[in-house]
Image: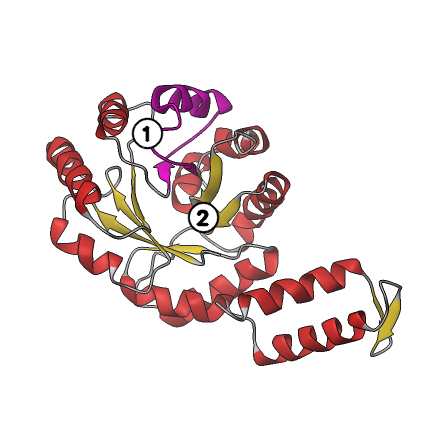
Amino acid sequence: MHRSLLFVPGNRPDRYEKACESAADLVCIDLEDAVGPADKVSAREMVLDYLAGTSHKHVALRINAADTEYYKDDVAALAKSGLKLPFIMVPKVSSLSELKSLDKALADKCGPFFVLIESAKGLVNCEEILSHRMAEYALYGAIDYAGDVGCDDRWETHLYARSRLVAACAANDVSLFDSPYADVRNLEGLEAATRRARGLGIFARSAIHPAQIGPIHTALAPTDAEITHARRVMEAYAKTDGNVALLDGKLLEAPIVKAAEWVLAWSTE
């Protein structure tokens, strides 16, 4: 189970290895937002060279968006590379047809898709987009979404978008990552916001600095009280032979047992 993803700029090869050696579960070398137009070509070459030579199995890349002039060259270079990666991050996806086109171009060569939903069109079409057979991960891009619709960055403002993506990802067995927390120095705020996202059903988060990984993992880890309760649930359930029972006066049903199994699974991470 992946809890965290760390972004690293594609035009900073000095940071690739440091990112991979961090505590992040996944690493994404970025060819999109983090790289200016003048560095796009050289960054692509450096990233593909690094990925071809590294022994790390948890690092991949984000290509440029389909509506940019760099997209076709990114895809062509990937298809030619022969790389098999843990994911291909696809930004600003707004329709299922975009993933179908990418799937056709790569023909299962490179790995599953990590889909970014970060626009009004993407959110409106998210259920269909995330039904694509290659969609294995998704990320809510709150900053880009806010720019697209003109909203602010308050938690309540993005509650609907996050909740809709939780349902869409759960329905399609896609792992959802939350948007990076923009204030790199505010680690307490990051941890608190990640706990709120976990409460919605988002069990992973992206980061833009290695220092953010620890607070993300802490926020996503079950508390001692949750682990203790989960163990009591499983012990009580084991005595029921699958029948309905009570625990502390509350009905012990299948959803409660499933939640307890989740807590115990995550407590070992």
Which residue position holds label 2?
152
Residue 269, image x and y in percent? 48, 67
- The secondary element bearing badge 2 is classed as loop
| Residues in magenta, as a range | 87-115
Q: Is residue 112 magenta?
A: yes
Residue 86, image x and y in percent? 36, 43
Which residue position holds label 1?
65
The part of the image, by quadrant, that contains residue 243 is bottom right
Closer to the chain start, of discs 1 and 2, is 1
- The secondary element bearing badge 1 is classed as loop
Three-letter code, disc 1: Ala
The part of the image, by quadrant, that contains residue 43 is top left
Asked if 71 appears above or below 171 in the picture, the reply is above
Asked if 105 appears above or below 60 in the picture, the reply is above
The answer to whether marks 1 and 2 mark residues whose Cβ atoms lie closer than 8 Å is no
Mark in the foreground, 1 or 2: 1
At x 26% / y 31%, what residue is drawn? 82
Residue 161, image x and y in percent? 55, 43
